[in-house]
């Protein structure tokens, strides 16, 4: 019995020594992992804040992109910290990185459309074919830009309807930006009535345009005969105006032309 008891005691002592050695070894590993995690979190946060502040100081760099890239940097640092912590416990980091790569590939394939929108959003924010407040037309989408996000762009149509367009649809089609240039050309078509005195009508329209057309650093306004049919003529008024005055100037100038021709007794079929 004494020999059996001694064997048990020796076995228990050996097991305790082994557990103590494991506890010491893994205790240092756990302590090191905790230190790495805390330091990694602090470094990742500091890197995100400093990169965001630095990108915001770059002239013309979009704030959404600055926030996006700073978050990407933070997550990249956290992934490296996680892999390093696993290495503290003897995990093969090569297999972890391979698993992360495979998972990233699977996620990329599953979210292919979403990633296309993100890539398109980055290109839109970098190249800036349009900005908030500008009126655009692209494909079946047209309206005033409200906000450009990483996934989609918000617009408001001319009749106040909310539009959410995926960025890929805006990036992969030609875009007409009606607000980007400082001046725009406008054409007003005046269809005179039958047998209207063309020379007098043209002179009256030229006088109105000379006085009322908005001034822009572009070619001077012109009035010319664009069509003759069935004894009636069509005058086209072509002028340039500042972009912000384009719509209002067309309405007011059309009204003034109509009033001047009516006062002279010249029949007008339509003005558009």
Image (spheres, grey):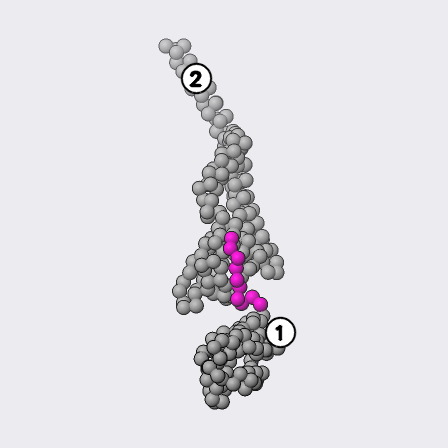
Q: Quick check: 117 above or below 195?
A: above
Q: Quadrant of residue 15?
A: top left
Residues 24 and 216: in front is 216
Tell me residue 209's x, y (percent).
56, 82
Tell me residue 123's x, y (percent).
55, 53
Which residue appears at 43% of the width and 64% of the height? 156
> Residue lying furthest front in this view?
230
Residues 163 and 248: in front is 248
Give the residues drawn in magenta, as a range.
172-181
Task: Give the number of the mark in front: 2 or 1.
Answer: 1
* Mark 2 lies on residue: 11
Which residue appears at 40% of the width and 15% of the height? 8
The N terminus lies in quadrant: top left
Tell me, for residue 218, which label it has, or none: 1
Label 2: few (<14), some (14–19) or many (≥20) C-alpha neighbours in 10 Å:
few
- Point out the tag, 2 or 1, that comes first from the N-terminus: 2
Please tell me whether residue 119 belongs to the stretch shown in magenta: no
Residues 195 and 146: in front is 195
Tell me residue 12's x, y (percent).
42, 19
Please tell me whether residue 175 belongs to the stretch shown in magenta: yes
Lateral position of residue 163 relative to residue 184, left or right: left
Which residue appears at 54% of the width and 86% of the height? 200
């Amino acid at each position: 019995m004494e020999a059996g008891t001694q064997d048990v005691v020796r076995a228990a002592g050996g097991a305790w020594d082994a557990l103590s050695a494991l506890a010491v070894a893994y205790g240092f590993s756990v302590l090191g992992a905790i230190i790495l995690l805390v330091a990694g979190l602090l470094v990742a946060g500091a890197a995100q804040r400093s990169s965001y502040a630095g990108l915001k100081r770059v002239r013309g760099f979009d704030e959404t992109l600055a926030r996006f890239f700073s978050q990407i940097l933070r997550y990249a640092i956290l992934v490296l910290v996680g892999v390093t912590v696993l290495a503290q416990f003897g995990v093969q980091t090569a297999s972890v990185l391979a698993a992360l790569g495979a998972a990233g590939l699977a996620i990329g394939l599953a979210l292919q459309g979403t990633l296309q929108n993100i890539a398109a959003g980055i290109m839109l924010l970098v190249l800036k074919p349009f900005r908030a407040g500008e009126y655009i037309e692209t494909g079946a989408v047209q309206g005033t830009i409200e906000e450009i996000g990483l996934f989609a762009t918000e617009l408001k149509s001319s009749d106040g309807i909310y539009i959410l367009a995926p960025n890929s649809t805006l990036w992969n089609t030609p875009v007409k930006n009606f607000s980007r240039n400082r001046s725009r050309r406008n054409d007003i078509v005046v269809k005179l009535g039958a047998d209207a005195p063309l020379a007098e009508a043209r002179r009256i329209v030229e006088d109105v345009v000379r006085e009322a057309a908005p001034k822009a650093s572009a070619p001077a306004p012109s009035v010319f005969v664009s069509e003759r049919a069935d004894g009636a003529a069509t005058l086209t008024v072509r002028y340039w105006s500042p972009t912000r005055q384009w719509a209002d100037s067309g309405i007011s100038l059309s009204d003034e032309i109509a009033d001047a021709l009516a006062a002279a007794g010249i029949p007008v079929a339509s003005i558009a």
